[in-house]
Image (cartoon, rainbow, N blue to C red):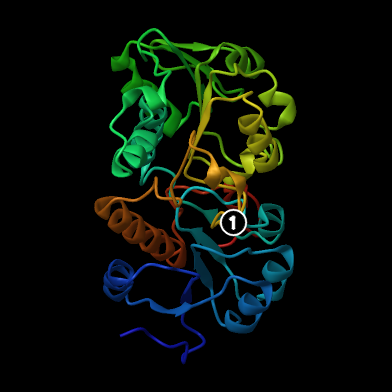
Amino acid sequence: MVSSPARAAEPFVLICGLDHANIAEETQVFHAAGLRFGPAMCREEEDFLGKCQEADGLLLQYGVVSRRVIEGLPRLRFLVRYGVGVDGIDLEAATERGIPVVNVPDYGTDEVANHAVALLLALCRKIARLDRQTRAGRWNVFEAVPIRRLAGQTVGIVGCGRIGSRVARKLAGFDVRLLASDPYLTAFPPGVEPVTLDRLLAESDQVTLHCPLTAETWHLIDARTLARVKPTAVLINTARGGIVDTAALADALRAGRLAGAGLDVTEQEPLDPASPLFRMEQVVVTPHAAWYSEEGRSDLKRRVAEEAVRLVRGERPRHCVNPEVFDRAGGTT
């Protein structure tokens, strides 16, 4: 049974905007720790401000936690994100208040890497298109030509951290040349050549995105950068939708300046059913599914709850996006 915030002096945690079927893993962790908790379907500012006044911590899947929300919740001590990206949280406002923002950056590394490689292979082998035409009764590989041999081609990895480096390791067995662009890395995986983004875009046959969404990477792939890409290249995005300018991508695909795209994330989610991307044979779209496996989902839920317990106990979390809040006077925990 989910606890209620009846005893205001005791820490209370709210699970916000979660679309999972249940909170079994969270309940197990919180009950073992004796921590009070509850669900709250919050995605908009007014929801957070109206339903979270008694919360010491928020566990967040969906929803935007703006400066107004952070400043309007006087009891708030920490924020824990289901997953990697924290672009929906005003990090500056949280840091100013000494509120740790915690994520789980390594729960689904293998799943996302596998999904990126799967999209790459599906595009190269034109799997989705061949499936559709075969189901329609057209048993003819030549409807989908050209299909090029993957070995010997060049794959460009934009962002070579946990997931990008895992993608590189998986692709090494396909006998491809690997390039990577990541301004924050000093050491790259074996067999990966570090290059500038411009060079990566110009030389790659497949470009796969694995960088976070920040002010710097917003629309990193736009009309200007797409103009540098080979017209025979394909783009894979399993990172964040906002990294790609959707309108510019559709224009490039429509004009034949890009051969294909594999998208697990889009700027608008769900993608508008009227989007021209859905009418393009050379595009494969999946519903922000790269993170998911039964094991990964369970692991994520458990680890999010464990981070909340650490924070309530005054312990340092495993992964904090703004660790400076622990190193200055007045930091929360």
**Quarter holding residue 44:** bottom right
Residue situated furthest top in the rendering = 152
Q: In the shown orientation, is residue 226 left or right of residue 113?
A: right
Residue plotted at (62% across, 78% down): 47
Task: Please give the name of the residue rendered at 70% of the width and 32% of the height, measured from the top-left corner.
Answer: 222
Please report the residue visible at 65 percent of the width from the left and 50 percent of the height from the top. 328
Residue nearest the viewer, comparing 114 with 269: 269
Quadrant housing residue 142: top left
Inspect this view and state whether residue 110 appears: no
SS class, disc 1: loop
Give percent across and percent down for residue 239.
Answer: 51, 40
Left or right of residue 110: residue 48: right
Tell me if I can see residue 146 in this picture.
Answer: yes
Q: Position of residue 223 (x, y in %)?
A: 73, 30
In the rendered image, the vertical position of residue 155 relative to residue 99, given as above or below: above
The quarter of the picture where the N terminus appears is bottom left
Foreground residue, 107 or 314?
Answer: 107
Between residues 192 and 80, which one lies in front from this camera angle? 192
Q: Residue furthest bottom?
A: 6
Q: Residue furthest front?
A: 137
Kindly identify the amino acid type of the residue bearing the numbered disc 1: Asp
- Percent x, y for residue 326? 57, 52
Q: Position of residue 301 (x, y in %)?
A: 35, 61
State the residue at coordinates (28%, 71%): 24
Is 60 above or below relative to 215? below
The residue beneath circle 1 is 272
